[in-house]
Image (cartoon, rainbow, N blue to C red):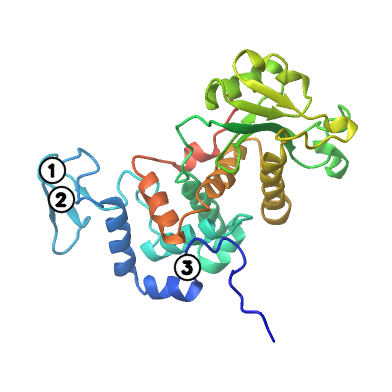
Amino acid sequence: MTRERTKAPGRNERKGLTIIELFDMFPNDQVARRWFEDARWEHGRFCPLCGSVETIHIPKEKPLPYFCRVCRRHFSVKTATVMHRSKLSYRQWAIAIYMMSTSLKGVSSMKYYRELGITQKTAWKMGHKIREGWDRGALKLSGIVEADETYIGGKESNKHASKKLRSGRGTVGKQAVMGIKERSGKVRAKYVPNTNARTLQRQLYNNVELGAIVCTDEHKSYLGIDLYFKHKSVKHSVGEFVDGMAHTNGIESFWAGLKRGYHGTYHQMSAKHLQRYIDEFQGRHNVRGIDTIDQMERMVKNFEGKSLTYDKLIKERVAE
C-alpha cells in the first residue's frame, strides 16, 4: 500500500507558475503589454511624466500609444521606468522577469541571450535593469535578528598573475558583505568597505529596531552593541554554533544561496555591480512566500520612476 502524498516539495503554500502557464498567459506582445499596464496602472492610467489622469489613447499609437492633455506629451507603460525607450518586446520583458523571479541561483546574461534571442550585451543590461525592481525594504527589522558578514570573490591563487594583489591570502581581493536576517523573516544585505566596528554597528543601527535581540558570532566588531540591542553571541572558533536561541544559522543559509549563485551562475561579481546582485538575492528571498505572479507584478510596480542607462551602469559603483 502506497502512502498518499499530502505535501509537495518546495514552498507548497504558495502558487507557482509553470512554463506552459507562462506562455499561455503571454501568447503575444499585445497581451503582455496589457499585463504591464494592469500591473503598473492598477487604479487607472496616469501620465508618468506629470501625474495627470487626463490621458487619451492614440488610435495609431504613434509615436507612443498615449497622450497627456496636461503636459502634452506622449507616453507608454515603459515611460519613466527601467524599460524606458527599450526596443525589447513586452513579452520578452515578462519572460525575463519570470526567469529572474523563479531562478533561486540567478539568471546569467548568457541564459537571457539564448532564451530570448537577444544580444549578450543587451541581456546583461536587461538583467541589471530587472534587479532595480527588487524591493529593498524600508521598515527596520525587529524581534530576534541574526547578523553576520561574509566575503565574495575569487581566490588569489586562481587569479592570473597580472591580477593578483600579492598582499597575502584569506580575504585578500574579496569584497565584504554585511547581512542581517530577521529570525524566520526578511534579510538585509549590503556590500561594505570593511568589517570594522563602526561599519558593522552602523548597519545594525540603520536596519534594526532599538532593543531587538541581535545574535552574532564572536567577531570583535560587535562588542558594544549591547548599548542599543540585546546582544547574544556564539563562539564559532571553539565549535559552538547554537546556544539556546542564539545562533546565526539563518543568515549563513542566505550566504550559502548567494555563493551558490556566485559559483554556479555568475562566476564573478565585480565590486562595481556587487550590490545589484546582492539586491537580487535579498529581494528574491524576501518575497518567496508569495505567489509567482504576485512577485512579478510587485517587481513591475517597483520599476516606477527608476532609470538605469548604459552609461550609468558602467560607471564605477563604490560602497558607502
The three-letter code of the residue at mark 2 reads Phe
Residue at which label 1 appears: 72
The percent position of residue 264, horizontal first and vertical second, equals: 72, 56
- Graded by Cα atoms within 10 Å as few (under 14), some (14 to 19) or many (20 or more), the crowding at tag 3 reads few
Task: Mark yes or no: residue 177 visible.
Answer: no
Give x and y (percent) for residue 18. 50, 71
Mark 3 sits on what residue? 17
The disc labelled 1 sits on which kind of residue?
A: Arg
Q: Is residue 252 left or right of residue 83?
A: right
Q: Nearer the viewer, residue 265 or 189?
A: 189
Frontmost of labels 3 and 1 is: 3
Question: Of the residues under marks 3 and 1, which one precedes in the sequence?
Answer: 3
Which residue is denoted by mark 2 in the rendering? Answer: 67
Q: Are marks 1 and 2 in contact (CB under 8 Å)?
A: yes
Task: Identify which residue, 103 or 163, lies in the foreground.
Answer: 103
Image quarter of the C terminus: top right
**Image quarter in which the N terminus is found:** bottom right
Q: CA distance from mark 3 to mark 1?
A: 40 Å
Give the distance between the C-alpha atoms of the residues marked 1 and 2, in whole angstroms. Answer: 7 Å
* Residue 258 place in picture, x, y as percent: 67, 47
Q: Point out the tag, 1 or 2, that comes first from the N-terminus.
A: 2
Q: Which of the two discs, 3 and 2, labels the residue nearer the N terminus?
A: 3
Residue at point 71%, 52% (across, down)? 260
The secondary element bearing badge 1 is classed as loop
Q: Secondary structure at mark 3?
A: loop
In the depicted structure, whether residue 242 falls above or below residue 114: above
Q: CA distance from mark 3 to mark 2?
A: 35 Å
